[in-house]
Amino acid sequence: MKRFTEINNESISGVAYKTITIKKAVIAYFSRYGNATIADLKTQLSLSTPKIIDVLNDLVEFGLVKDYGKQESSGGRKPNVYGLVNGAGYFLGVDIKNDHLKFAVLDLQKNLVSFKDKVPYEASNTEKGLNELCNIILGFIKESSLPKDKLLGIGISLFGRINQISGKSHNLFNFYNEPLEGVLSQKLDMRVFIENDSRAMCYGEFARGVVTTEKDMLFLNIDYGLGVGIIINGSLYYGKSGFSGEFGHVPAFDNEIMCRCGKKGCLETEVSGWALLNQFKQRIDKGSASILSDKYKEGNLEIDDILEAIYNDDVLAIELVAEMGGKLGRSMASLINIFNPELVVLGGKLTAAGENLLLPLKTALRKYSSSLVNNDTQIKITELNEQAGVWGACLLARNRVLEN
């Protein structure tokens, strides 16, 4: 029996190419809207009945589509209903964090099949780090018992500048002359798609999270770094070079702090997880008291420790997060004035600070943005939390396989 992966390997004459496109359109329709009759498909895809029947017969042979029999009808002849076979295909999402990986598997109908969090991994821009990543991914596939011929694509969310069109990463694993997507596809023997983490989180939240009817939204990823994902009229916005959303590298401060991008004064130098960690250490060095003083002196202070200290009423942690919220709110005001979005969703590690971050952020936002604009913009916290990136990676891989 043929599989979905063989559709792209059919001979590519003009007629064959059109047929492949129609097959993908039918699969995409089923995956978005569920089961349908021949009449439904004919209307929605503007195709003739004989063409629909031919394509459905081929997809039944591929093992992707099933004839589910007669549909209940109020009168007349009952039509047959077709739909995707359960387990016909899957997509794997991988979310690369600084110190761990997340995995998720979705089926063609966007149902979550499996999820695995906190897989140990230290992200490093080395060939050893890349090979280790590939070995962990292959190990997960083997462990999950996914038939390889049913795994249709892998989406990988990673931090840094990503050109989604060329498949190149310009920060992490950037030591190859060829695009990272191609390197990973070869190493994993699978179609691989890469995406910037903020955009992946944005799309995950848009498709499965807190978003309801909104079509224009911003997603602020407040993590070790600071990025923004942009949805305009229901689609991710990439920009000319694919590097939209580098919010953390907006020149915001007249300071001498060197950013990881090589510039000074970037927003990220004072508003990010790295900034919070550095500011916390500096304040302790200057004599500020904290329940984390001993942990800092032992050399193993992490951002999660600071976030936990907030809920133990640590004054220094609360003060620094509040200051950061005010600075972020002021810069967000510029985004809202420019984009006039329906919704801004806050995600990433630092949102665990809750109202300690959110209240000063909203105060600054009201102070520095136009009331004509901000009154129409909702501010929400992510619903998917730390699963947003891996959901987005899965869904974007699914979109690219079905649409390309």
Image (tube, grey):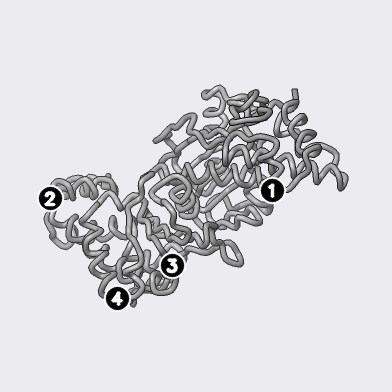
Residue 275 in the image: x percent, y percent? Answer: 31, 60
Q: Is residue 258 above or below residue 166?
A: below
Type of amino acid under label 4: Tyr
The CA span between labels 2 and 4 is 29 Å
Q: Residues within 10 Å of mark 4 (few under 14, many from 20)?
A: some
Type of amino acid under label 2: Asp
User: Which tag, 1 or 2, sits closer to the chain's start?
Assistant: 2
Q: Which residue is drawn at 54% across and 63% down?
A: 243
The residue at the far front in this view is: 75
The CA span between labels 3 and 1 is 32 Å
The CA span between labels 1 and 2 is 52 Å
The CA span between labels 1 and 4 is 43 Å
SS at badge 3:
helix
Disc marking residue 313: 2
> Which of labels 4 and 3 is toward the front?
4
Disc marking residue 249: 3
Q: Name the residue under label 4.
A: 368
Query: Is residue 64 among what the camera can see?
Result: no
Q: Locate the N terminus and report the quarter of the image it occupies.
A: top right
Q: Mark 1 points at which residue?
A: 404
Query: Is residue 251 among what the camera can see?
Result: yes
Q: Do the residues labelled 3 and 2 touch (CB within 8 Å)?
A: no
Q: How many labels does the image show?
A: 4
Near-viewer residue (280 or 357): 357
Q: Residues within 10 Å of mark 3 (few under 14, many from 20)?
A: many
Q: How crowded is mark 2: few (under 14 residues within 10 Å), some or many (20 or more)?
A: few
User: Which tag, 3 or 2, sits closer to the chain's start?
Assistant: 3
Disc marking residue 330: none
Q: Residue at x 80, y 39 (%)?
A: 51
